[in-house]
Structure formats: structure tokens, C-alpha cells
Image: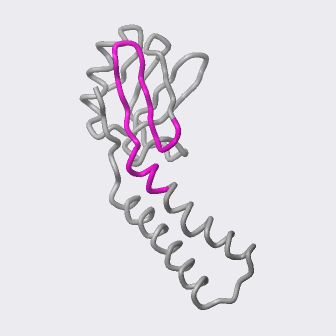
Amino acid sequence: MKFPSKKDWWLTIIIWGAMLFAIGSGVYALIFEESNLIDFVFVLIFTVMLPVFLLWMWLTTYYVLDESNLVIKYGPFKKIIPLNTIKSVKKSMNPLSSPALSLKRLEIVYSQNNMVLISPKDRDEFMKILSKHCPQAEIIL
């Protein structure tokens, strides 16, 4: 089952604002400032490639629960966590960097003290389904 990431409104404003600012400042620099090839490449990387990367991450962050794995997909990255290695799951507001687009997160501890934070749109439904697939895990509602 596929779960899209919840997206906080304030994070939406920050991400889209940063992308528009980067593109706008790059266009301004290319049109109104004299530049050599190195400057042009630098501006191109930070005003086109960075916003494209952020957009890719924004549009492709989701989580898939199948019979044996939790697959976390975010942009070009993919993390596969075998369900039998999950030790605990609890709700969290931890602001650490993670493949989550909201602060309403789930903290998943797996394997040898590894931890990942995710933000499925429906945390309660995700935890309910995960508890069926991971009877060994401590699910803290």
C-alpha cells in the first residue's frame, strides 16, 4: 500500500519560495550582470538544478508498505527497510532532517539502533497497517 507524505503548509511556502527566489535571482543575474563561463555555470547549477532537485523531492516523497518491506522513496533516493527488522514505531515531532515533508512524523527504529523519520499523510492508518505486518514491533499510539 502506498502512502503519500503529509506536507505542512509552512514548509510548502518555504520550499516554493526558495525555488522561486533561486530562479528569479538566477534570471536576474544572467540578464543584468556580466558573467564569464564559470559564473554562468555556477548560476545555472544553483538556479536551475537546485530548484529541480527540490521539486523532485517534493513531488516524489512517499512510503510503500508491502508484505515484507517498508520502502521510503524521496527524489532519487530509496531506502528499503525489511519489516522483520522494525523494533518500534511512535509518533514524533522531531525536526531532524529526514524523508518527511511534515513535522507530524513517525519515528521508526529498526535493525541495530537505526532510526528514520517519515510523515505519512494518515499516520494512524499507517501505524494500524504496520502493526499487522510487524507483530514483533512495539507500536506506540
Residue 101 horizontal/vertical position (percent): 41, 48
Given the current orientation, which residue lies at the most extreme front position?
Answer: 37
**Which stretch did the figure color magenta?**
54-77
Residue 38 % position (x, y): 75, 73
Q: Quadrant of residue 133?
A: top left
Q: Which quadrant would residue 91 be assigned to in this image?
A: top left
Q: Foreground: 58 or 128?
A: 58
- Taking the image as shown, residue 75 lies to the left or right of residue 36, namely left
Q: Tell me the residue at 50%/79% (across/down).
A: 24
Q: Does 22 lie within the magenta span?
A: no
Question: For residue 56: magenta?
Answer: yes
Q: Position of residue 5 (x, y in %)?
A: 35, 42
Q: Tell me: residue 25, above or below residue 89.
A: below
How is this picture coloured?
one colour
Q: Residue at x 37, y 32 (%)?
A: 63
On screen, residue 89 above or below 33: above
What residue do we see at 53% from left, 72% from top?
22
